[in-house]
Image (cartoon, grey):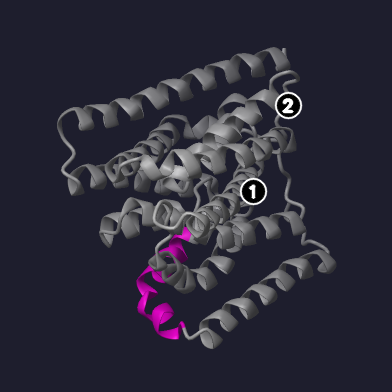
């Protein structure tokens, strides 16, 4: 994995960057958006870190962009969601092109059906579910998903990091499981901007015992695809039914500021993940995920049944993670017997 890719392959990645930066510069300078791009520099600064985590961990860049916009800048959750999908359509796509160009190993037997499931679930969620979910519910859903991710890693980080090699196929299970992960993960992503990547990653590392160097790039690709489908659907809906569906101009302005940063930040994270110890990065990210949960509870003054449901959601998801881990352990023992 440490060998350098052939020059012809890496040129594909740099060709993509050249096309993107040319297009971005044309939009900014010839479209008259220089002032808006400069004025939104704080999100570009935040996404410098967010894009690195997007490429080096199973977290989309929206995992940083969403709380920064919604919790720090006090923007609506719907704006945070749309920005997450939009910025990941550059950052995660850029990382995906790098991953494919350098032939990083991927788990295609789960990824293929997950892509098909996301292609159906994401537009359905964008059209029929996301517009009707209250802002607080979106914030709590986001907080619960990523706090659960953080708790899982603090509990299971050793076996997750220790896994090595390709995940063995599970005939009769792979296709329906991949379809379900893509479909329901796409619906979650339509509401929060992230989620399908974490679901696929959890299946790979807990149930299939996949190597992190395979599971993380695989999660990057599913999030890149889902983000493109999601933001394309939202833009189309806002064009066909303005007022009912709406993508605020602020999403575009924040995207202008952050896109040139994430285009290189996420691929850099994808490059780093195969060359540096994985445990510290996962623990740092997990601590941030739990921290944003606490921040959300305090910032939105979540109490009573809402707080009980949020904490219960984190516990319930970790019960599911524990079950997947135990099933994966039994399956691995039978395979090695």
Q: Is residue 162 visible?
A: no
Question: Where in the figure is residue 151, as x and y percent of width and height?
Answer: 38, 34
Return the residue nearer the eye: 175 or 211. Answer: 175
Question: Where in the figure is residue 75, as x and y percent of width and height?
Answer: 29, 59
Vertically, is 337 above or below 110?
above
| Tags 1 and 2 touching, CB below 8 Å | no
Q: Is residue 241 visible?
A: yes
Image check: 86 left or right of 131?
Answer: right
For residue 47: magenta? Answer: yes
Residue drawn at (74%, 25%) of the image: 169
Vertically, is 127 above or below 162?
below
Q: Badge 2, how many Cα within 10 Å: few under 14, some, many 20+? A: some
| Residue that badge 2 annotates | 168
Residue drawn at (57%, 58%) of the image: 89
Return the residue nearer the eye: 262 or 306. Answer: 306
Q: Badge 1, how many Cα within 10 Å: few under 14, some, many 20+? A: many
**Prevailing secondary structure class for the magenta stretch in the rendered image:** helix
Residue drawn at (47%, 54%) of the image: 241
Question: Where in the figure is residue 160, as x and y percent of width and height?
Answer: 55, 33
Vertically, is 296 above or below 70?
above
Vertically, is 249 above or below 203?
below
Image check: 264 left or right of 34?
Answer: right
Earlier-in-chain disc, 1 versus 2: 2
Closer to the eye: label 1 or 2 = 1
For residue 121, which numbered disc appears in the image? none
For residue 328: magenta? Answer: no
Among the 4 quarters of the image, the one containing residue 45: bottom left
SS state under label 1? helix
SS state under label 2? loop
Q: CA distance from mark 1 to mark 2?
A: 20 Å
| Residue that badge 1 annotates | 221
Q: Which residues are magenta?
A: 33-50
């Amino acid at each position: 994995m440490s060998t350098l890719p052939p020059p012809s392959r890496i040129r594909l990645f740099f060709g993509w960057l050249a096309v993107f930066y040319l297009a971005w510069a044309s939009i900014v300078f010839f479209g008259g958006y220089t002032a808006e791009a400069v004025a939104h520099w704080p999100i570009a600064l935040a996404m410098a870190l967010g894009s690195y985590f997007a490429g080096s961990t199973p977290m989309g860049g929206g995992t940083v962009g969403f709380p920064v916009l919604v919790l720090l800048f006090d923007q609506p959750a719907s704006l945070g969601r749309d920005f997450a999908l939009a910025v990941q359509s550059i950052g995660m796509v850029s990382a995906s092109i790098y991953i494919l160009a350098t032939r990083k190993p991927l788990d295609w037997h789960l990824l293929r059906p997950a892509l098909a499931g996301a292609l159906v679930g994401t537009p359905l969620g964008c059209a029929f579910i996301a517009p009707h979910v209250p802002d607080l519910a979106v914030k709590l859903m986001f907080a619960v998903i990523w706090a659960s991710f953080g708790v899982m890693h603090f509990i299971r980080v050793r076996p997750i990091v220790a896994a090595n090699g390709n995940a063995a196929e599970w005939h009769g299970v792979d296709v329906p499981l991949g379809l379900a992960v893509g479909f329901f993960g796409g619906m979650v992503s339509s509401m929060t901007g992230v989620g399908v990547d974490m679901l696929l990653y959890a299946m790979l590392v807990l149930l299939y015992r996949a190597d992190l160097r395979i599971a993380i790039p695989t999660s990057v690709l599913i999030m890149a695809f889902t983000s493109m489908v999601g933001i394309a659907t939202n833009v189309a809906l806002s064009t066909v039914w303005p007022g009912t569906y709406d993508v605020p101009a602020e999403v575009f302005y924040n995207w202008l500021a952050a896109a040139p940063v994430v285009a290189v930040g996420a691929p850099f994270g994808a490059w780093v993940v195969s060359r540096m110890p994985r445990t510290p990065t996962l623990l740092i990210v997990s601590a941030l995920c739990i921290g944003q949960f606490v921040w959300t509870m305090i910032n939105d003054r979540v109490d009573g049944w809402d707080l009980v449901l949020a904490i219960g959601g984190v516990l319930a998801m970790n019960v599911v993670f524990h079950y997947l881990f135990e099933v994966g352990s039994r399956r691995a023992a039978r395979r090695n017997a």
